[in-house]
Image (spheres, rainbow, N blue to C red):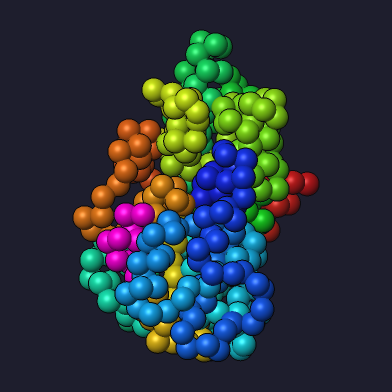
Amino acid sequence: MGNNTKRLTAAVVGLGMAGTLAACGSSDGGQGSGDSKTVTLVSHDSWAASKDVIAAFEKQSGYKVRVLKDGDAGQAVNKAILTKDNPQGDVFFGVDNTLLSRALDNDLFQSYEAKGSERIKADYRVDRDEHRVTPIDTGDICVNYDKKYFADHKLEPPKSFDDLVEPQYKNLLVTENASASSPGLGFLLGTAAQYGDDGWEGYWKKLKANGVKVVDGWEQAYNEEFSGSAGGKKAKGDRPLVVSYASSPPAEVVFADPRPSTAPTGVAEGTCFRQVEYAGLLSNAKNTKGGKALLDFLISERFQEDMPMNMFVYPVREGAQVPPEFVKYGPQAKDPETMAPAKIADHRDQWVKSWTSLVLK
């Protein structure tokens, strides 16, 4: 999920994730290792896993895991496509439903049905005929609000897309550039799903007239402009509404010291768009056997239950336990906007182009 909640771990603590990743092998930026005892995972910057969980996989499989991080989701996917004939690794993690068609159209992945795939919730399975990608995690892109701001101003926080264009919310919302940022694109797709092919542009005209601010990426929007996050408070951010994730409030609790009894931020439930992230075996992977073992592991119960507190996303495996902090502070949206990957594929580039000329010009 690109420049996103998974980075909350880094962002809220104010540290990079180097510590988490030390156990995952070096990210030396070299070519994918031809060594049959090493399996290389290529990902966006937000990958994180517990040391003991990676160690368990290495012990059980006999492969050493090497992780190569390649910028945010959009950058990482584009780079993987450019290097597909001589890939940097064996498995790519982090292509989501907003960019999936780009990866599949460019033959980025080879077919492999991971062991345990039948345990993945049916809603998240795509490409069932060819099994080029395996769903790994899911999350909801939603508007978050600063509870203190709305209490101080005796104002009800917005609940829906419709609310955001009301006069009482003028100059309060910051979002990300839909052409450069995964949550920014997800928010645009959410409005297209809500208002239809003919209605979303009119909606954005109203949003623009109501003072929406657009910045390049999630990091800037959430940790600099948004008044409700730990980072935003430090940066004296003055926007009490931000496009982020439904799992952002639990991160604000988990990384605060001391931990508050309630999250300082909330989620506008009627503004959510569901994102699903996939992994796949790269078409010209040097270590296909190791790559397959790693994909099997990514949907195992052990990894799926480790993932929420490391990457602030939800598991896709049926029966995987979700941490209590998620249940309490960041439940999944009950009725998020969704869109078929084929529809996203058909319209994404044109929508982004129209959005850019409408909102940024």
Q: Position of residue 280 (x, y in %)?
A: 44, 75
Q: Is residue 30 visible?
A: yes
Q: Is residue 59 magenta?
A: no
Q: Is residue 144 left or right of residue 337?
A: right
Tell me what residue is drawn at x 63 percent, y 66 percent: 70
Tell me what residue is drawn at x 52 percent, y 18 percent: 148
Q: Is residue 341 visible?
A: no
Q: Which residues are magenta?
A: 295-306
Tell me what residue is drawn at x 61 percent, y 69 percent: 27
Query: Who is closer to the viewer here, 312 or 199?
Result: 312
Query: Who is closer to the viewer here, 106 or 133?
Result: 133
Q: Is residue 302 magenta?
A: yes
In the displayed structure, 112 sits above or below 228; it is below
Residue that sits furthest to the right in the current view:
361
Tell me what residue is drawn at x 50 percent, y 28 percent: 257
Query: Who is closer to the viewer here, 245 or 344?
Result: 245
In the displayed structure, 163 sits above or below 62; it is above
Q: Position of residue 301 (x, y in %)?
A: 27, 61
Query: Who is closer to the viewer here, 23 or 111?
Result: 23
Q: Position of residue 298 (x, y in %)?
A: 37, 67
